Image (spheres, rainbow, N blue to C red):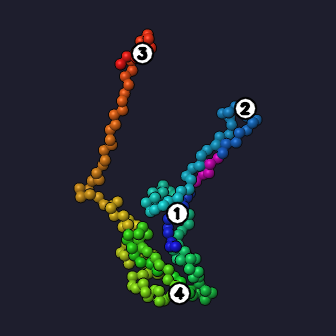
Amino acid sequence: MSYNEYPKAMKHPAYRPAVIAKWDPKIKDAKDQPQGSSAKFPGVIVHNLDQEQEYAAKGYKPNGVGDPEAYRKSMTGNVPRPDGSEKEYPKYLYRPNATLESGFEDKLVSSKEEEQKLGKGWFRTPDLARAAAGGSPVQAASAAAPEETAAPAGGKVPQKKAARVKAPVKKAGKKKAGGEARA
């Protein structure tokens, strides 16, 4: 299991919870009853960088900060010793891979022999793997789907025309004395 930044929960600083109206039997007139209200700026779950940027523009902030290194430590049991050192193995290693959404692939190795079998091109953190590929996390995420971001040669994106559907229209007419409508 590898570290994934998404899905991510985000909240808005101006969040207000919903207020449920409670009917007061002592108040006879309905317009004088306590009024409820809907929630304002409820929390959202984002599933990719585009959604995160969209909601960040609306004022939403992530609930905390994701930490790949802390995730690695919790998954491998590799926590610092009292003297400040860490066990070297098991550990995750990362390699750039533009075909994956994260921009890198990972592998858990349990010994120095396993690490040597992997060969060169593996890094200790995802950020080092992305940097070795020559991109930032944003560039790595957008490099996964270049066909979605590429514009045609003319620079304009072709627009599809909506299909026109003609619906049959009944003609309205005056009713005759017999109850039949004119055509």
Q: Residue furthest left?
A: 154
The CA distance from mark 2 to mark 3 is 52 Å
Residue 104 in the image, given as x and y percentages of width and height = 42, 73
User: Are the residues flagged by discs 2 and 3 in contact, CB closer than 8 Å?
Assistant: no
User: Are the residues flagged by discs 3 and 1 in contact, CB closer than 8 Å?
Assistant: no
Q: Answer whether residue 128 is magenta in the image.
A: no
Q: Nearer the viewer, mark 3 or mark 4?
A: 3
Tell me if residue 101 comes above or below residue 18 in the rendering: below
177, 56: nearer the viewer: 177
Q: Secondary structure at mark 3?
A: loop
Residue at image position (61%, 89%) is: 83
Q: Earlier in the sequence, mark 2 or mark 3?
A: 2
Residue at image position (51%, 82%) is: 91
Q: Earlier in the sequence, mark 2 or mark 1?
A: 1
Q: Residue furthest top?
A: 177
Crowd band around label 3 with a 10 angstrom C-alpha radius: few (<14), some (14–19), many (20+): few
Q: Secondary structure at mark 4?
A: loop
Residue 38: assigned label: none
Tell me if residue 59 comes above or below residue 123 in the rendering: above
Residue 12 in the image, given as x and y percentages of width and height = 55, 56
Q: For mark 3, what is the residue?
A: 180
Residue 28: assigned label: 2
Q: For mark 4, what is the residue?
A: 88
Residue at image position (39%, 73%) is: 97
The CA distance from mark 3 to mark 4 is 92 Å
Residue 147 in the image, given as x and y percentages of width and height = 32, 61
The CA distance from mark 3 to mark 1 is 64 Å
Crowd band around label 2 with a 10 angstrom C-alpha radius: few (<14), some (14–19), many (20+): few
Q: Nearer the viewer, mark 2 or mark 4?
A: 4
State the extent of the magenta-drawn residues as a range: 15-19
50, 103: nearer the viewer: 103
Q: Earlier in the sequence, mark 3 or mark 1?
A: 1
